[in-house]
Image: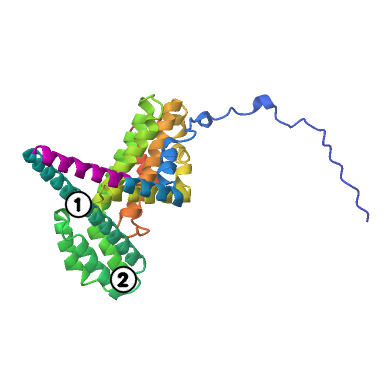
Amino acid sequence: MSKKPVLIDLEDTSDTPSVAEAPPVPESAAVPAASPAAMEQAARIAARKSSRLARWFWGLLVAVVGAMVSVATWDFATALIDRLPVLGWAVTAGLAVLAVLALGLGLRELAALSRLRRVDALRQAAAECHDLETARALARRMEGFFKGRSDLAWQRARFSERCEDVMDPDALLLQIETDLLAPLDALALREVEAAARQVATVTALVPIALADVLTALVSSLRMIRRVAAIYGGRPGLVSSWRLTRTVLAHLAATGAVAAGDDLLEPILGGSVLSKVSRRFGEGLVNGALSARVGLAAMEVCRPMPFSQTRRPSTRKVVQRALTGLFSKEK
């Protein structure tokens, strides 16, 4: 039995919907976006790695200028002693005190760098902990690291009572997080949310060129320093800058600062974002990126990696930090 071909009329447009009947474009499609976001610019500026030639140049320049200043200071002091002995010796004593203070500041920076390296060593040991013996050794190191913290005295006492009864390495690591690090996580999250709100507010309300970039950079520096201090890092001036470069370099490498507005619509709602101005939209994007920088700082400064149950959600942190600026429409 032969089959006949089926003919389809492609010109039949009786059931084709009209263009005029198409639904309107959703209002949330007009969400203002920061292009480019100031927080992204600040992160890339701070995370940019200098070349070896530039490092040699600045190192040699500092050495030459330091030698010139030292020789000029010495000549000034000796000439003043020859002319006015009393005044000359007084100035010499002041310069000696200044040199001692500079040495003290240098030792303080070295101590801060050493403490940051100790935090890195603890985090690396926690990541490589797979048996009960190394977990107990890590617990003792954690107790020693937080020994001088009066705000954790009660938590350390409770942890000392409980840790001896734990016979599972994963449970012991979770106990360290629960007893010693959970209060510090709460304080660090509070700092991150405050910095995100500040960046969003200044970007939205201050119509000055480069004000948002400077605010984002300064707020990030202060936030990273405070987060490190909360976890026991106690960074100084040089160590704070080094820590900031580490945090922002990680963000730039992973591309986390390249997307900020993707979080805002599901958090705040398209009906809210579609009604704010472009400047306020940029403020929200910069605030979201500041929150991401803060969470990265927590991961870098925390002496132990986050477990899956205690890792803070970026979406929830951004929501708590920014939903107070605008109210959702019901």
Cα gap from disc 2 to disc 1, whole angstroms: 44 Å
Q: Nearer the viewer, residue 322 or 230?
A: 230
Label 2 belongs to which residue? 169
248 is higher (above) or lower (below) than 152: above
Label 1 belongs to which residue? 103
Instruction: Tell me the kind of residue under disc 1.
Output: Leu
Q: Quadrant of the C terminus?
A: top left
Q: Nearer the viewer, residue 34 or 237?
A: 237
Residue 5 is tagged as: none
Pair 2/1: label in front:
1
State which tag comes first along the sequence, 2 or 1. Answer: 1
Where disc 1 sits, the SS reads helix
Residue 81 at x, y percent in the picture: 11, 41
| Quadrant of res 144 | bottom left
Residue 266 at x, y percent in the picture: 45, 39
Q: Is residue 327 visible?
A: no
| Quadrant of res 221 | top left
Asked if residue 71 lies in the magenta stretch, the reply is: yes
Residue 197 at x, y percent in the picture: 33, 35
Asked if residue 10 lies in the magenta stretch, the reply is: no
Magenta span: helix, strand or loop, mainly? Answer: helix
Residue at 66 percent of width and 24 percent of height: 20
Query: Dot 2: within a 10 Å radius of its alpha carbon, few (fewer than 14), some, or many (20 or more) residues?
Result: some
Which segment did they paint magenta?
Answer: 65-84
Residue at 38 percent of width and 37 percent of height: 287
Query: Dot 1: within a 10 Å radius of its alpha carbon, few (fewer than 14), some, or many (20 or more) residues?
Result: few
Where disc 2 sits, the SS reads helix
123 is higher (above) or lower (below) than 55: below
